[in-house]
Amino acid sequence: IRDIFEPQNKHIYEGLKRADCCLVLLPYQKKLLQVRLSGKKIHIIPNIIDVVQGKAGEKESYSREEMPASVDFGAAQASNSKNIVMLARMIPSKRPDLLIKAFALAQSQEVKSAPLTKWTVHLYGRFLKADFDWKIKTLIRKLNLEEKVFLKGETNIPAQVLARTDIFVFPSAE
């Protein structure tokens, strides 16, 4: 959020000054904007998903233990496994390649006190362009992560996926 005060982003700052209110994700963002935009209404809306698409009478949220088995993390589903999940449209601006590269880097710098052998990455979402799908698959092969990074496609049960997720990552540039 500090970037909005850089000279090249003056148009964003000017737009914020004209807005009736500003919405941010984190308390530190609110504090930062309050200093620059004194008197402006600034509200925090946390980035949380806690609902399940469903019918009347269904639970709205699930614990990891009570989640239906419809979420399949494959071999990574062992009780001691850990799952990193990205749920998004698979387009360049959502940066799934950044997640894959970061995971590869973490694996290469693994230390004995924090082994990553039990971790896997699961990318949920539809690729809107075939060439980007090819680019991501090529990156996974190039980094030798075929047994660690999985392209899962679209899901109609995102809440169930998230309930079985250890870390949710959304490296979007948007």
Image (cartoon, grey):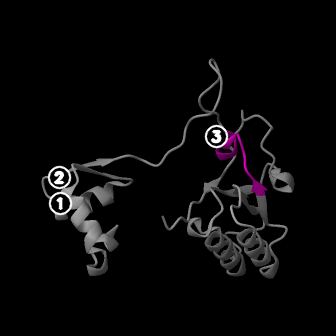
Q: Do callouts 3 and 2 mark residues in contact (Cβ within 8 Å)? A: no
Q: Do callouts 3 and 1 mark residues in contact (Cβ within 8 Å)? A: no
In the image, the segment drawn in magenta is 152-162
- What residue is shown with label 1? 37
What separation in Å lies between label 3 and label 2 (alpha carbons)? 35 Å
The disc at residue 165 is: none
As displayed, is residue 74 above or below residue 116? above
Q: Which one is in front, 119 or 38?
A: 38
Amino acid type of the residue tagged 2 in the rendering: Lys
As displayed, is residue 2 above or below residue 49? below
Which quadrant, please, contains the N terminus? bottom left
What separation in Å lies between label 3 and label 1 (alpha carbons)? 36 Å
Q: Secondary structure at mark 2?
A: loop
Q: Do callouts 2 and 1 mark residues in contact (Cβ within 8 Å)? A: yes
Q: Is residue 82 left or right of residue 16?
A: right
What separation in Å lies between label 2 and label 1 (alpha carbons)? 6 Å
Mark in the foreground, 3 or 2: 2
- What residue is shown with label 2? 40
Q: Is residue 113 left or right of residue 68?
A: left
As displayed, is residue 24 above or below residue 159? below
Residue at the spot x=53%, y=64% of the render? Answer: 172
Amino acid type of the residue tagged 3 in the rendering: Ala
Residue 134: give x, y in percent of width and height: 78, 73
Within-10-Å neighbours for mark 3: few <14, some 14–19, many 20+? many
Within-10-Å neighbours for mark 2: few <14, some 14–19, many 20+? some
Within-10-Å neighbours for mark 1: few <14, some 14–19, many 20+? some
Residue 112: give x, y in percent of width and height: 71, 74
Q: Which of marks 1 and 3 precedes in the sequence?
A: 1
- What residue is shown with label 3? 159
Residue 116: give x, y in percent of width and height: 73, 68
Amino acid type of the residue tagged 1 in the rendering: Leu
